[in-house]
Image (spheres, helix red, strand yellow):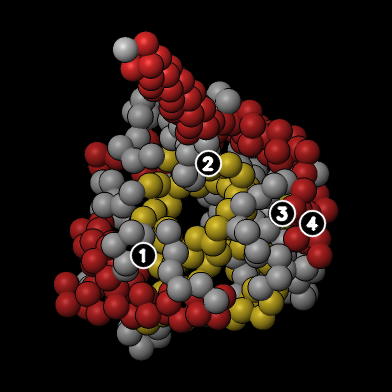
Amino acid sequence: MQHMRATCLSVTKFYTYLGRRLLFVGLVWTACRARAPEPGGGLAFFHWKNRLSLGPEEVALLDSTECRTLYVKFLDVARGADGVVRPYALLDVRDTSGLGGRQIIPCVFLTNSVFEGLSADSAAWLAERVTMAVEGVGRQLGRADFSEVQFDCDWTARTRAVFFSFLRKMRSSLPAHTRLSATIRLHQYKHPRRTGVPPVDRGLLMLYNTGDIESPDEEHSIFHTRDALRYVEGAPTTYPLPLDVALPTFSWTLIYRDGRLWKIAPEGYAPPPYEGDQRIRTEIVDTALLRQAAQVAARLSLAPDGRVAFFRLDGATARRYPATLLKDICRKVKDR
């Protein structure tokens, strides 16, 4: 009996010990889960060139900012001079070094005219062609599929129904696990009932191009706090989709001839002589203006796991914006 009692006590102690160990493991596992980052968060960049070959400055910026997400334009879709809608400007992948360990989100840019008068059958055909193009570029990158694909189109009330139909066809055309996201302009953010909400999983709010680029008298068309606040103030408390945000880290030179926008050129471009009225405006988002954009972004209804993406990644961005500044901006926007 004493032996049996001792055995029972030993078994009881064993299970008590085992229970405590399992409880401890469970608590540790729960704590690790709580600390694990949610999908989608962090700092990101946009690569918006037709050729992919990251230079040393660009790779260094990605590394120094601990960037793990890169939005990459895979192709454009537009209506040609013959009126036919087709994908073009597919990404030419020259060098994949610098991409290791980073999430790639393919971006598809579509002009609004693509969806003017587009039939349901044509929308289905276009979805198939876009899927094939994304997969083709993916093979160049050595990647079979992607967790997210983004669509960039400034749709209007007239094209909304067809564009949204196209997005639904894309959802059925892409692998089932692929999330869809769409860019959201400021006017669409402020008036979701009027403009509609795209049938996607996430939105990315473009916090730039706040002014009228067509006007030669505009002060700054890329970003002006006054203009941005017109869209933020009075907007719904929350947007119907989880939102990421994109901030401007680019510049350009705008050339106007006879009162009309003639050319968008790189910063520092010197146009040829012209007889008549020619005006040139170079717009630069310096560090002070970028911080102002971040202050506006901190007021938005971003998702808890929202990304802060910078448009765009190139050598000029690497030289103009220190990594410490971009990381600080990302942190302040997310910790609002």
| Sequence-earlier tag: 2 or 3 | 2
Q: Residue at x 65, y 65 (%)?
A: 99
Q: Residue 25's spot in the image, x, y percent?
A: 48, 29
| Sequence-earlier tag: 4 or 1 | 4
Front position in the image: 252 or 102: 102
> Is label 3 in contact with label 1 (beta carbons under 8 Å)?
no
| Sequence-earlier tag: 1 or 2 | 2
Q: Residues within 10 Å of mark 4 (few under 14, many from 20)?
A: some
Q: Which residue is mark 1?
A: 112
- Mark carried by residue 62: 3
Q: Which residue is mark 4?
A: 60
Q: What residue occupies the far bottom of the structure in this picture? A: 82
Q: Residues within 10 Å of mark 3 (few under 14, many from 20)?
A: many
Identify the secondary structure beneath mark 1. Answer: helix
Determine if residue 247 is in view. Answer: no
> Is label 1 in contact with label 2 (beta carbons under 8 Å)?
no
Amino acid carrying label 1: it is: Asn
Front position in the image: 215 or 315: 315
Q: Is residue 254 left or right of residue 117?
A: right
Q: Is residue 255 left or right of residue 157?
A: right
Location of residue 55 by image quarter = bottom right
Q: Residue at x 67, y 80 (%)?
A: 94
Q: Which residue is mark 2?
A: 41
> Is label 4 in contact with label 3 (beta carbons under 8 Å)?
yes
Q: CA distance from mark 3 to mark 1?
A: 32 Å
| Sequence-earlier tag: 2 or 4 | 2
Q: CA distance from mark 4 to mark 1?
A: 36 Å
Q: CA distance from mark 2 to mark 3?
A: 15 Å
Front position in the image: 56 or 2: 2
Q: Name the mark nearer the viewer: 3 or 1.
A: 3
